[in-house]
Amino acid sequence: MPDRRAWGVVAADAVGAIVLAAGRASRMGAPKILLPWRGRALVLHVLDALAAAGVAPVIVVVAPHTPPLPRPFPARAGHRVPFELLCNPAAAEGMGTSLAAGAAALAGRVDAVVVCLGDQPAIDPATIRALVAALRPPAVAAVPIYQGGVRGHPVLFAASCLPELAALRGDRGGRDVLERHPWARVPVDAPAPGDVDTPEDYARLLAAPQVATGPGTAASAPRPERGAGAPGAADGGEGR
């Protein structure tokens, strides 16, 4: 059987994830990743989406001040929610250190890595699958382009980017890596999922109507679009 990586095709079962959950939450005033939404913690919705998309292993990067996450998390819709918890002692120096820690933890284990925000619970598994389908040479990353041309998360990086991601320091994020390489645009016919940085963001999330999407579904299936993007795309960062 040919090595799919030699053909530039990412094997669906060789995609890992980094969930950035080490932000200070200074504007929120509370540990936002554990805030409840539709009966579950925000970060658990992110893990649900990754599980539904078949992504593993999953590294959740937290800070020393992050409250303990309940283990194990309950599963939803029959999906297991396995993850590896990684404490970043340098989290206060900036989100680049958390991305670097997660990248180092996945080196040699995956063909590609999805970078997600722990406070962005409405990401769609279909978007993740579309990013994986779009990753073809010469692109070494794939970025969702939401309605209005908004670049957002999650962002997919090929394993070849892991050394650069692992070398990030301070508040530098995945944007720096994207600026140096071609990346694929993945149009998504939906608004960009919001993250929760402030009490106002959380209030909007709680008030938003529930749409008929969930693990394994999408309001409108993303369509991969070939070609390289311009610099300045979505960062691989976490909200503060």
Image (cartoon, grey):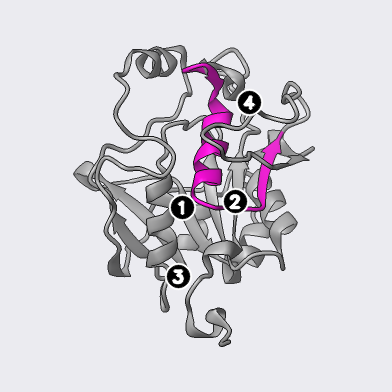
How would you rate the neighbour count of disc 1 (Cα within 10 Å): few for under 14, some for 14-19, many for 20 or more?
many
State the CA–CA distance, disc 1 to disc 2. Answer: 10 Å
Residue lying at 40% horizontally and 12% vertically, measured from the top left: 203
How would you rate the neighbour count of disc 2 (Cα within 10 Å): few for under 14, some for 14-19, many for 20 or more?
many
Mark 3 and mark 4 lie on one chain; the one further toward the N terminus is 4
Mark 4 and mark 2 lie on one chain; the one further toward the N terminus is 2
State the CA–CA distance, disc 1 to disc 3. Answer: 14 Å
* Labels 1 & 3 near each other (Cβ < 8 A): no
Q: Quick check: can you spot residue 179?
A: no
- Closer to the observer: label 4 or label 2? 2
| Residue behind mark 4 | 24
Q: Nearer the viewer, residue 202 or 49?
A: 49
| Residue behind mark 3 | 181
Q: Looking at the picture, does residue 197 appear above or below residue 11?
A: above
* Labels 4 & 2 near each other (Cβ < 8 A): no
Residue range highlighted in magenta: 37-62
State the CA–CA distance, disc 2 to disc 3. Answer: 20 Å
State the CA–CA distance, disc 1 to disc 4. Answer: 22 Å
Helix, strand, or loop for circle 1?
strand
Rendering quarter of residue 160? bottom right
> What mark, if any, has residue 155 been given in the picture?
1
State the CA–CA distance, disc 4 to disc 2. Answer: 21 Å
State the CA–CA distance, disc 3 to disc 4. Answer: 30 Å
Residue lying at 54% horizontally and 49% vertically, measured from the top left: 115
- Closer to the observer: label 2 or label 3? 2
Left or right position of 219 against 117: left
Q: Looking at the picture, does residue 159 appear above or below residue 41?
A: below
